[in-house]
Image (cartoon, rainbow, N blue to C red):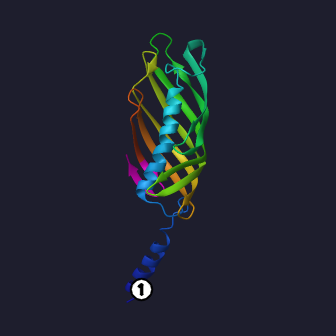
Amino acid sequence: MRARALGLAALVVAAGCTTDPLNRGQISQIQAIALTDQIVRIGLTGVAGHAPGSGGAAIVLAPRGQVTFTVSYDQGCLEAGSIRVTGTVSGTLNDITGDGTLTVAANEAIQNCTMTVEGRRFVLNGSTGITGAFVYSEGGPAAEQGARIKGDFDWTSTPGDPGRCHLDLITGYNTATAQVAVTGQACGYNVAF
């Protein structure tokens, strides 16, 4: 009987531990993926579009192939608001071959980013960090790049109550096709898209 009581107590304790303090509010997996997709695409396409060799970047080449540049741009969201991406990219590229790796450290400021998914109008505010490396071959960005996007955003929705989502994502990005592959955690869901 005592083992049964302990089992019941463990079940009650385990049930109480399912609350995720990083994610609040009612949001479907489809909604979470749609909101996350916009944040990922704006961050990755903007950073990649401002990388050396892709045009638009302020590049400072130091002796021995040291490369440092800043990223600073705003992009509008689907319906309203914007995402501002700021950060730095730095590393070394071989002076002769142009091969090398540049480290990325950027932040996305999500400002009233608005979109409608499954009949709900969401307005997002928050920030994420983008970390990773750009690989270069023969002086230009290699086709496949990767980054981690991690952070939080608050959301309001009409109809519905407000909430909060935590993101921890690993992304693959093809610079030639602008195709993105994402795996990880978004708003309490395991996602892969």
Q: Position of residue 162 (x, y in %)?
A: 57, 61
**Outermost residue, top side:** 96
At 41% across and 24% down in the image, what residue appears?
142
Residue 170 magenta? no
Q: Mark 1 falls on what kind of element?
A: helix
Q: Position of residue 108 (x, y in %)?
A: 58, 41
Residue position for label 1: 5
Q: Position of residue 73 (x, y in %)?
A: 60, 32
Comparing 41 with 148, the one in front is: 41
Look at the image and give the residue range highlighted in magenta: 184-193
Q: Position of residue 6 (x, y in %)?
A: 42, 82
How many residues crowd mark 1 within 10 Å: few (<14), some (14–19), many (20+)?
few
Identify whether 10 is placed above or below 25.
below
Comparing 144 with 133, the one in front is: 144
The quadrant holding residue 99 is top left
The quadrant holding residue 65 is top right
Give the residue type at disc 1. Ala
Identify whether 91 is placed above or below 41.
above
Residue 2 in the figure: left or right of residue 48: left
- Residue 47, visible in the rendered structure: yes
Identify whether 55 is placed above or below 34.
above
- Residue 108, visible in the rendered structure: no
